[in-house]
């Protein structure tokens, strides 16, 4: 199996749902099923924050969510935890600048999808050289999901990456809703990633459908 193509990734990144148990008010598996019913195109299991699961509980939930994704043909990525990703044969991993070095991660995961959070042109260049398949860029808008979130960047950084000639698939993250999602795509992103706007929505399927409509213009 070779690396995932840019075109395949661009399609998969359109509505990228990220969550773990701490982001949900209902049981995570049910939240994921509803999000898939609404039309998400990719999923990342991110088990971080106060009260996050560890050990066997984290592993069991990862397997349960992965099974749901596989039933529906949704790529399943793991945030940061390379050992977990490899033990369950996830489709890929996503890492930030404070996680393991990207070139090390690429060697560990082989041809699996590697997403890297980048905030500057220098980080973007390094990520490409280390084997990144896509960039996560943000926070685009104010967000309360991540306690250690970087300063809000707006869509400027995405525009800079495109102006510099980066053709790597890009997904925007941070405070994205149906009301502002179109601006992220217009800036040059291929998709949007969302956590609590989906996981804590009153109607998850309806919220995902609204997000889809707002970017597939």
Image: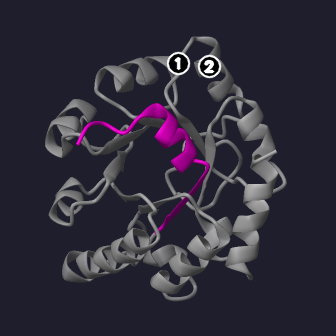
Query: Is residue 177 at all visible to an observer of this figure?
Result: no
Magenta residue check for 168:
no
Residue under pointer 2 = 162
Vertical position of residue 150 compared to residue 145: above or below: above
The quadrant of the picture occupied by the N terminus is top left
Vertical position of residue 205 compared to residue 3: above or below: below
Question: Disc 1 on helix, strand or loop?
Answer: loop
Q: Position of residue 92 (x, y in %)?
A: 32, 51
Give 126 or 204, whichever is nearer the viewer. Answer: 204
Residue at position x 84%, y 54% from top? 179
Q: Is residue 122 left or right of residue 167?
A: left
How many neighbours does mark 1 have within 10 angstroms: few (below 14), some (14-19), or many (20 or more)? some
**Looking at the image, do the residues carrying marks 2 and 1 touch, with CB atoms under 8 Å apart?**
yes
Q: Is residue 100 left or right of residue 125?
A: left
Query: Is residue 108 at all visible to an observer of this figure?
Result: yes
Question: Disc 2 on helix, strand or loop?
Answer: helix
Q: Quadrant of residue 198?
A: bottom right
Residue under pointer 1 = 166
Between marks 2 and 1, how big is the CA–CA gap? Answer: 5 Å
Residue at position x 52%, y 30% from top? 119
Magenta residue check for 17:
yes
Q: Position of residue 117 (x, y in %)?
A: 45, 39
Vertical position of residue 137 compared to residue 146: above or below: above
Q: Quadrant of residue 48?
A: bottom left
Residue at position x 41%, y 18% from top? 125
Residue at position x 66%, y 40% from top? 152
Q: Quadrant of residue 182?
A: top right
Total tally of numbered discs in the picture: 2
Vertical position of residue 173 compared to residue 183: above or below: below
What segment carries the magenta color? Answer: 1-19
How many neighbours does mark 2 have within 10 angstroms: few (below 14), some (14-19), or many (20 or more)? some
């Amino acid at each position: 199996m070779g690396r995932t193509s840019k075109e395949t990734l661009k399609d998969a990144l359109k509505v990228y749902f990220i969550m773990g148990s701490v982001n949900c008010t209902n049981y995570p598996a049910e939240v994921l099923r509803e999000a898939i019913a609404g039309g998400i195109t990719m999923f990342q299991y991110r088990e971080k924050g106060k009260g996050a699961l560890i050990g066997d509980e984290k592993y069991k939930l990862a397997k349960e969510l992965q099974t749901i994704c596989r039933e529906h043909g949704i790529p399943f990525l793991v945030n940061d935890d390379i050992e977990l990703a490899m033990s369950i044969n996830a489709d890929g991993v996503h890492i930030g600048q404070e996680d393991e070095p990207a070139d090390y991660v690429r060697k560990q995961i082989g041809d699996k999808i590697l997403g890297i959070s980048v905030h500057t042109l220098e980080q973007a260049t390094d990520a490409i050289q280390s084997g990144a398949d896509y960039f996560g860029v943000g926070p685009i808008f104010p967000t309360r999901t991540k306690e250690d979130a970087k300063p809000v960047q707006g869509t400027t950084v995405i525009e800079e990456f495109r102006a510099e000639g980066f053709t790597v698939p890009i997904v925007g993250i941070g405070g994205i809703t149906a009301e502002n999602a179109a601006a992220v795509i217009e800036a040059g992103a291929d998709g949007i990633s969302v956590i609590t706007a989906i996981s804590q929505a009153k109607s998850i399927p309806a919220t995902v459908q609204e997000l889809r409509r707002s970017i597939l213009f």
